[in-house]
Amino acid sequence: MDRPLALVTGASRGIGAAVAGALADTHRILLGGRDSAALEALAAQLPDARPWVVDLADDAAVADAAAGIDRLDVLVHSAGVAQLADVTHSSADAWRRNYEVNVVAVAELTRLLLPALRAANGHVVVINSGQGLSVREGWGPYAASKFGARAFADVLRAEEEPNGLRVTSVYPGRTDTEMQQAVVAAEGGEYSPAKYLRPESVAGAVAAAVLASPDAHLTDITVRPRPHR
Ligand code: NAP
């Protein structure tokens, strides 16, 4: 029998790539992203993975790409953007860009794949953020989008748990990825990877939820960097 199928968005790098690695021994993986060369390179390192190349901001392309998937065991939403500015300097476009990838694309891809997920009693994992639990000045559009993603996951769980789905939100703290490098640069701070989570550690939390025994539903997982290691 085929191994279960997982689609991981944002798999070209960072947390998504680590999640793909963490599930690779137990799942066939579709590696979502726009950078086909990076996805091909990762696929070559994993036992059973292939690129799923689509711009999540392109509704028509997402619909086309999702149309071929009839049965899906795991959908991990790791694709995300973070554009930081205080409210004074956040244009309508900044709010839209964060919402487009962090909320609308998550909702739309999930909607398109719901029949395939229901067919498998599947699992949806949303990589959220500490900013989806409490806000900080200067993070308005990103934090609002992550609060939106948390509400989406909670609503989806309420609606689809009776249909057999599991829905997990994972809330990582600062993690050593390209996104965090850009965030620290925008803050004018010093990049200190030793203080941050490793992407593999966040991926471990995702794997714990996905591989939990079928009677268990891990709904919300907060992962913080430990100051003393
Ligand atoms: P990252 O290294 O910047 O990677 C972002 C991923 O999202 C890339 O694979 C990128 O693909 C993909 N992506 C962005 N826009 C896309 C679009 N329009 N269509 C398709 N793919 C798109 O970020 P990360 O740190 O791994 O973040 C992953 C998730 O964790 C995000 O949801 C983020 O908000 C969350 N998070 C991160 C941190 C942190 O400190 N790093 C902390 C808390 C939460 P391309 O290669 O195509 O650009």
Image (cartoon, helix red, strand yellow):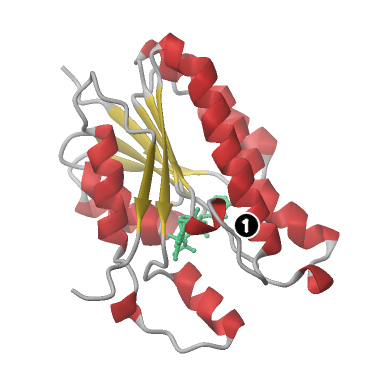
Compared to residue 62, the image places residue 128 above or below, namely below
33 or 26, nearer to the observer: 26
Give the percent coordinates (x, y) of residue 46.
21, 48
Residue at label 1?
143
Q: Is residue 169 visible?
A: yes
Does ligand 1 reach within 8 Å of label 1's beta carbon?
A: no
Left or right: 212 with respect to 95?
left
Q: Residue at horizontal 49%, vertical 17%?
A: 160
Identity, as a three-letter code, of the amino acid under mark 1: Ala
Would you place residue 192 above or below residue 63 in this image? below
- Residue, x 64% and y 66% (percent of image)? 139
Which residue is found at the position 38% from the left and 33% from the top?
A: 219
Percent from the top left, x then y, of residue 65? 53, 32
Look at 57% across and 24% down and name the residue there: 112
Q: Could you tell me how many numbered marks the image carries?
A: 1
Using residue 11 as the reference point, say whether residue 138 is left or right of it: right
| One can see residue 67 in this view | no
What is the secondary structure assignment of the residue under circle 1? helix
Query: Badge 1 local density, few (<14 within 10 Å), some, or many (20+)?
Result: many
